[in-house]
Image (spheres, grey):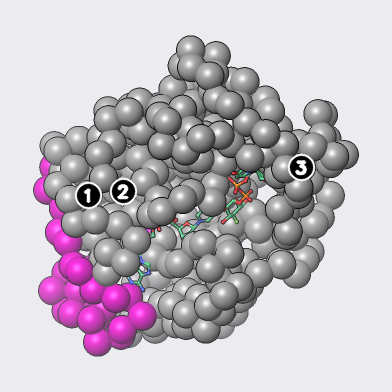
């Protein structure tokens, strides 16, 4: 199939482009590079040893997106493009609502115009809010604590309503848990701008000596050791989940958790990282981070049952691959 991958130069998108190419699909990337670099396109082609087509465009512009559909027969879309920094979304809500929701609506509209019925959307476990773990797809969504999370819940709603009104549509809403790690080549991985917000890139930068020590946000949660629990998933497993979702799309709207189903605390992750890489990660315990929940992990059984997909890579390989990328990475 010819797949349009919006946000394909980003962290999850780039790994997914490789998985798509390896599965025999053709890839067209649309990315405005607001949070990624052009060199990523070359790296994707090098790793997969295949060509991709690249459009440097903003996918919230219908005019720009139309050009792709005029030039190519697109069979399906995987829509990753979006802004994703939770803290920034609180400071600049309009940027987040505009970018993330308008781009979803533009793509849905272009799909209608050109008769493209297959759409896979990047959602997030954040839409479960403070539900009881493990999170199951059938749970009512609870309000999230930030505009970023709201853009995911609203986009899910928009795509669901469109698919209900157009029975030929096949839409997959993928709720990711915590993607970490990097491609085994060490050539691509997560390279956030500035000081990282997320745990794994913070840990790798401490290990590298770029940051002095990790600050662990709270050790008084009702969890195994008091630190926050999350469901870390290797980004290559996540990428393969997208190929499975695309290849198994059927009419209607389908929601899938993409996680491992296993919760890991911050201290357990630090320990695993030290063990996997034989390197020390100094840390201190500080106050809880506002907006954080105690535990977040998936019931991942639906994706296994319906897509035949399950995460294969363990925590040690996530830590090894994240570190291998950080060591090689030059800004
Ligand atoms: P990323 O920032 O690395 O990738 C997003 C890409 O989209 C970037 O290359 C950026 O330049 C591009 N982009 C943003 N707005 C655009 C626009 N209007 N037009 C064209 N390109 C645009 O982020 P990621 O971690 O790869 O996340 C991909 C998707 O998955 C996002 O929608 C994100 O919200 C979602 N998600 C990520 C996580 C996570 O922890 N990384 C968790 C849950 C969901
Ligand atoms: N943490 C620290 N120190 C840090 C960074 C994080 O202790 O420097 C802790 C957090 O308190 C939390 C855990 O590590 O307990 C994971 O935090 P992350 O920031 O890595 O990830 P979150 O679970 O907060 O959020 C991520 C994405 C969201 C997405 C969500 C889905 O950032 O966009 O996963 O589960 F919505």
Q: Are marks 2 and 1 in contact (CB under 8 Å)?
A: yes
Q: Quadrant of residue 163?
A: bottom right
Crowding around mark 3 (Cα neighbors within 10 Å: few <14, some 14 to 19, many 20+) is some
Q: Nearer the viewer, mark 2 or mark 1?
A: 1
In the rendered view, tell whether residue 119 sits above or below residue 39: below
Q: Are marks 1 and 3 in contact (CB under 8 Å)?
A: no
Q: Are marks 3 and 2 in contact (CB under 8 Å)?
A: no
Q: Earlier in the sequence, mark 2 or mark 1?
A: 2
Residue range of the region highlighted in magenta in the rendering: 50-79
Crowding around mark 2 (Cα neighbors within 10 Å: few <14, some 14 to 19, many 20+) is many
Q: Residue at x 30, y 85 (%)?
A: 62
Q: Quadrant of residue 320?
A: top left
The CA distance from mark 1 to mark 3 is 36 Å
Q: Nearer the viewer, mark 3 or mark 2?
A: 3
Q: Which residue is mark 3?
A: 218
The local secondary structure at tag 2 comes to helix
């Amino acid at each position: 199939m010819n797949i349009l991958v919006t946000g394909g130069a980003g962290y999850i998108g780039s790994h997914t482009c490789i998985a798509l190419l390896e599965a025999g699909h053709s890839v067209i990337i649309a990315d405005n590079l607001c949070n990624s670099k052009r060199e990523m396109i070359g790296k994707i082609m090098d790793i997969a040893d295949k060509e991709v087509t690249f459009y440097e465009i903003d996918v919230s512009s219908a005019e720009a997106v139309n050009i792709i559909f005029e030039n190519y027969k697109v069979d399906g879309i995987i829509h990753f493009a979006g802004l994703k920094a939770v803290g920034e979304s609180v400071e600049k809500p309009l940027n987040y609502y505009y970018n993330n929701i308008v781009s979803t609506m533009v793509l849905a509209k272009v799909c209608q115009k050109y008769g493209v019925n297959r759409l896979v959307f990047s959602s997030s476990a954040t839409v479960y809010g403070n539900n009881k773990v493990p999170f199951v797809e059938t749970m009512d969504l609870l309000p999230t604590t930030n505009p970023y999370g709201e853009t995911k819940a609203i986009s899910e709603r928009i795509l669901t309503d469109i698919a209900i009104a157009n029975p030929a549509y096949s839409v997959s809403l993928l709720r990711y848990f915590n993607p970490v790690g990097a491609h085994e080549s060490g050539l691509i991985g997560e390279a956030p701008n500035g000081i990282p917000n997320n745990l794994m890139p913070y840990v790798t930068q401490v290990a590298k000596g770029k940051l002095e020590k990790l600050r662990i946000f709270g050790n008084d949660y009702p969890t195994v050791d008091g630190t926050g629990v999350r469901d870390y998933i290797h980004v290559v497993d996540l990428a393969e989940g997208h190929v499975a979702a695309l290849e198994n799309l059927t009419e209607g709207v389908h929601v899938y958790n993409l996680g491992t189903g296993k919760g890991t605390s911050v201290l357990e992750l630090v320990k695993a990282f030290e063990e996997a890489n034989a390197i020390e990660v100094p840390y201190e315990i500080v106050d809880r981070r506002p907006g954080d929940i105690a535990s977040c992990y998936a019931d991942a059984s639906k994706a296994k049952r319906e897509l035949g997909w399950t995460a294969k890579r363990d925590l040690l390989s996530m830590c090894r691959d994240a570190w291998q990328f950080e060591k090689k990475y030059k800004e």
